[in-house]
Image (tube, rainbow, N blue to C red):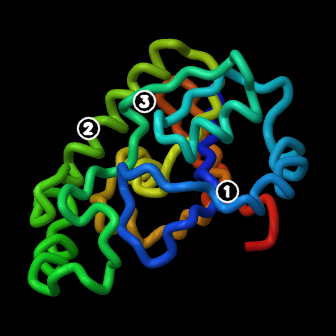
Amino acid sequence: MNITLLRHPAVAAHGLCYGRSQVALLPEWLSQLPALRASLPQPLPQIYTSPAARCMVVAGFLGGPNVQADERLQELDFGHWEMLPWKDIPIDEMAAWTDDLEEAVPHCGESGLDLIERAGNFLEHLVNQDQDALIVTHAGWIRALLAILLNTDLAHAFRLDINYLSLTQIVINEDLVTISSINQNIVSP
């Protein structure tokens, strides 16, 4: 089973903590669509997407009716930090979160463990389906899934760069999981 993870394109929210908030895609992403299509497996497998508009739009361009939105693919809920400039988040709250990415919730949103649980639940669903998949989602979700597959904590997974419009490739053969690429850029960043 081949799983391709695609992070959504860049958004018009530079410097903001936007997690679950709806933010617009920068229009330049459309010029990257041909390169994106050329980088994806053909024929396209089942496409799953986060319900966030920034993912749904991309999935729609790629797969039309072959797209299934799933709540489990959403980004971390940053609670009262949503749409705040990162620089305006109180230092003590940010320190509490970065010191314990898995359990701390100073933003009164979702914990890292909640995100990992959602990612694990969706992975179990995919394994039970035993079919190739393209997943259009978010950097935090991709890192959470990689934390599961690499058997590491979220703090280590958050050290991985996951650029906008990058691909991460995973192959699952029975009990053997291979991560064949992480953060593969389809165009120059």
Residue 110 in picture, x, y percent from top left: 19, 50
Q: Nearer the viewer, residue 94 or 180?
A: 94
Q: Is residue 56 above or below residue 157?
A: above
Residues at circles 1 and 2 in contact by the CB criterion of under 8 Å: no
Circle 3: residue type: Leu
Q: Residue at x 78, y 26 (%)?
A: 44
Give the distance between the C-alpha atoms of the residues marked 2 and 3, in whole angstroms: 10 Å
Q: Nearer the viewer, residue 182 or 70?
A: 70
Residues at circles 2 and 3 in contact by the CB criterion of under 8 Å: no
Q: Residue at x 49, y 22 (%)?
A: 126
Asked which secondary structure carries label 3, the reply is: helix
Give the distance between the C-alpha atoms of the residues marked 1 and 3, in whole angstroms: 21 Å
Quadrant where the N terminus is found in the figure: top right
Q: Which residue is mark 2?
A: 117
Residue 76 in picture, x, y percent from top left: 31, 51
Mark 2 or mark 3: which comes first in sequence? 2
Circle 1: residue type: Leu
Q: Which image quadrant for residue 48?
A: top right
Q: Which image quadrant for residue 42?
A: top right
Picture disc at residue 123: 3
Asked which secondary structure carries label 2, the reply is: helix
Residue 130 in picture, x, y percent from top left: 56, 15
